[in-house]
Image (cartoon, rainbow, N blue to C red):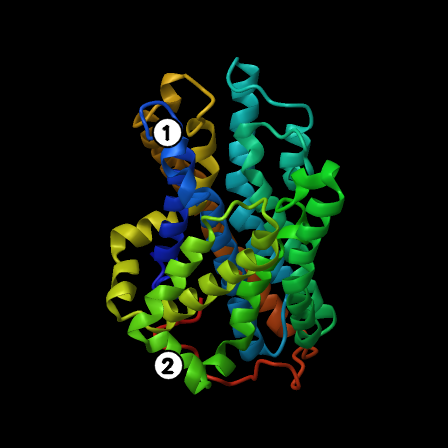
Amino acid sequence: MDSRRIPSLDGLRAISIGLVLFGHLCGTANFFPRSAFAPLGDFANLGVRVFFVISGFLITYLMLDEIEATGTVSLKLFYLRRTLRIFPASYGFILFIFLASRLGGPTLARGDLFHAITYTVNYHLHASWVVGHLWSLSVEEQFYLLWPALIAFFSLRYATLFAVNALWIAPISRFVIATFLPAYRWGVAWWFPTIMDPIATGCLLAIFRKRLEANGVYMAVLRSRWFVLIPCCAFLANMRPDGRRLSMLLLQPFINVAIAVTIHRVVLFDKTMLGRFLNLRPLAFVGVLSYSLYLWQQPFLNRSSQAVVCAFPWNLMIAGVAAAASYAFIERPALAIRKKLEQRVRQRYSLKSRIPLFDCAATVRVGEEQPSGAKRQ
């Protein structure tokens, strides 16, 4: 594992992928029926929401770290990192699914490959199960085409305004579509304008982190022994069906904020009992594998299939083996290439005159210390 990692995030990723796995396992052969846990809400959806908030926080944290170090943001570096982090493993998965379908495996719907390759699955009405989970990657890639460009070409202030507006635009979009456009209800929480708020919440946590840490009331809440009530309330809020108007307007935004402050607590206080648990090596290792696990669990955790490979526990074991292979032979080598190319780009970039893109009047201030235990990544 990278010693420069931000503490607790890998453990949180492990919790997130655990929620996704459990949610998709329910209803598969030899596992609990979906009805047994249906009153507790959609575990998989909650896990993806945690992933979104973590992603927004981490991406923005690293960009602010770069601004502090260099006074600017390199879009070339950002998109290089993002491309080599996401594309090799996902395209490897898509290629496998395509070949398997040609050999009599899973049946693909019309448009599946096009939308999977172009990261637009969240706009594909008839996406088949085996590629349906790529909707979340599509949302992330659409967000990160926009987010760094706002910072680089405008300023952090404008990017912050966009993220703040996303917090109310997304809930209202969900409500309006669900209430007045019934033919398009399938797009609620799939289409970018209706689901951008969890990522934006994570971005805002990174931006306002230092101001929050200077607020005595907020820090008292983070330190409180009763803080556990916040994630518990988020879990209870997730029990409400996503289709209800109250959930769309109020409960989902509350869940996003609860996830964000929970992330802040475990990153800031990584020496607490919960922090030490999240940083256990086995849990952190699962977090490292979480991206590959998310990609490869979908074909095997299929409750509509009666195939042996989709029956518990074989489905979970096969998904784990496939994820480990993907990480070892695709994801990890791609990250090594990314590191080498990033060093070259940085060397070239450092020789050029740099125009500071940081707005000194923006929310985050240059030169402030990082949270306890956090190291530059």
Which picture quadrant has residue 32? top left
* SS of the residue under disc 1: loop
**Which residue is at a point 46% across and 64% down the rendered structure image?**
258
Give how far across and how far down residue 61 sits, in percent.
51, 69
Dot label at residue 33? 1
Which of the two residues, 6 or 357, is positioned nearer the viewer here? 6
| Residue 340 to residue 126: above or below | below
For image coordinates 69% across by 72% down, the residue present is 161
| Residue drawn 62% across the image and 69% down it | 349
Q: Is residue 20 visible?
A: no
Q: How far across and down, in percent of the image, does residue 71 sit? A: 61, 79
Q: Position of residue 309 (x, y in %)?
A: 37, 21
Q: Nearer the viewer, mark 1 or mark 2?
A: 1
Task: Using residue 156 as the reference point, say whether residue 9 is left or right of it.
Answer: left
Kindly check if marks 1 and 2 are in contact, taking CB atoms under 8 A apart as contact: no
Whether residue 86 is visible? yes
Name the amino acid type tagged 2. Ala
In the displayed structure, 112 sits above or below 247; it is: above
Kindly state the secondary structure of the residue where label 2 is placed. Answer: helix
Give the image location of residue 308, x and y in percent.
36, 18
Against 269, residue 322 (above or below) is: above
Left or right? Give the position of 329 relative to 269. right
On residue 172, the disc is none
Name the residue: 25% across, 57% down: 280
Q: Earlier in the sequence, mark 1 or mark 2?
A: 1
Location of mark 2 (residue): 220
